Image (cartoon, rainbow, N blue to C red):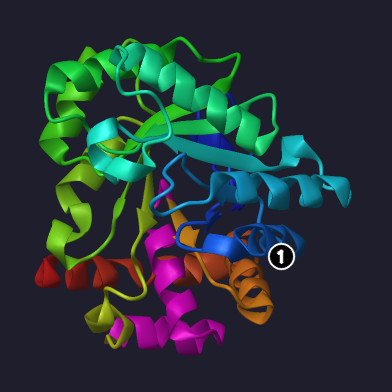
Amino acid sequence: MSSSLSSRLAIGQNVPLLLYGTAWKEEKTSELTEKALKHGFKGLDTANYPTAYNEPLTGIGLSAGLDSGLNRNDLFVQSKFTPAWAHDEDKIPFDVNQPIEDQIKESIQQTFDHLKVDYLDSLLLHVPYKDVKDTIKAWKVLETYVPSKFRYIGVSNFTLEQFKALYEAATIKPTILQNRFYRDTGYDIELRSFCQEHGVIYQAFWMIRHNPEILNSKVVDQVSKTFRVEVEIAFYLLVLGLGDTQVLNGTKRGEAMDADVAAVEKVFNDDEAHLKLIEFIPDFKKLLSELA
């Protein structure tokens, strides 16, 4: 079992199971981005959303990683466009007195300037617009960047109904959906099922701080003991074991970065270890259903 998801995505590119989440890193964003790359992360998640991300500093950290000898083609770099309504009023990075299409183009150009790359592996629509017509309008703009500038396009913070509406209207179908994985969303059980049926990768975030019941559960404890990893890593492994998933990981400690990357590589690059993990998935799914 490979640690890439390339067999499940249309263009066959290596897609890492773990993405380093750069949200809320503030002035330490560049340092932590560079550290994550140094400690084995192959994926980065950012956004042109100054409320929670410092995308220019992500770019500095990424450049440092590339200068150290990393190959751009071995990395998965993902950013997001955030509609004006979702920004803090005093932090909107683009001119709102222009059509939605031009707002998106301006924001995307800023992202390329921030990250100093020629292409993005993935660009997500950070949240839906309040009017579905505007969501579809925005999506049509993103489609024009595929494949020359964006390898994949996707969405974040969508409900099943919102995602179905966009999916049906899209010419280029979304490849990725990134959502909070916690009790308030019911762990997106139905939405994840829709994603799997349509070849869409589900990216999970908000996992550790918002899931005390799962971290204290029997199945997580069993996985932790079986693979001799911390319970947080056991939780990551179980979510990845659901299939067609990626996990956002925002740890700040180098030791934790090493442990997380090593555990995922060990389990998903070894058939025997992966099969052992799969034995726990029915109990994990049952737990999610009970908590939802």
Q: Which residues are magenta?
A: 218-245
**In magenta segment, residue 221:** yes
Q: Position of residue 7 (x, y in %)?
A: 55, 35
Q: Write down the residue under mark 1.
A: 35
As shown in the figure, which amino acid type bears the numbered disc 1?
Lys
Q: Where, by quadrant of the figure, is residue 257 drawn?
A: bottom right
Q: Which quadrant holds residue 263?
A: bottom right
| 217 sits left or right of 115 in the view | left
Q: Is residue 13 visible?
A: no
Residue drawn 61% across and 65% down?
28
What is the quadrant of residue 30 in the picture?
bottom right
> Percent from the top left, x then y, of residue 58?
62, 49
Which residue corresponds to the image point at 16% horizontal and 57% vertical from the top-left? 185
- The residue shown at (54%, 42%) is 5
Instruction: Depth check: give the residue in front, 102 or 197.
Output: 102
Q: Foreground: 106 or 122?
A: 106
In the figure, 133 relative to 195: above or below? above
Q: Mark 1: few, some, or many residues within 10 Å (few <14, many ≥20)?
A: many
Coordinates of residue 281 in the picture (x, y in percent): 33, 67
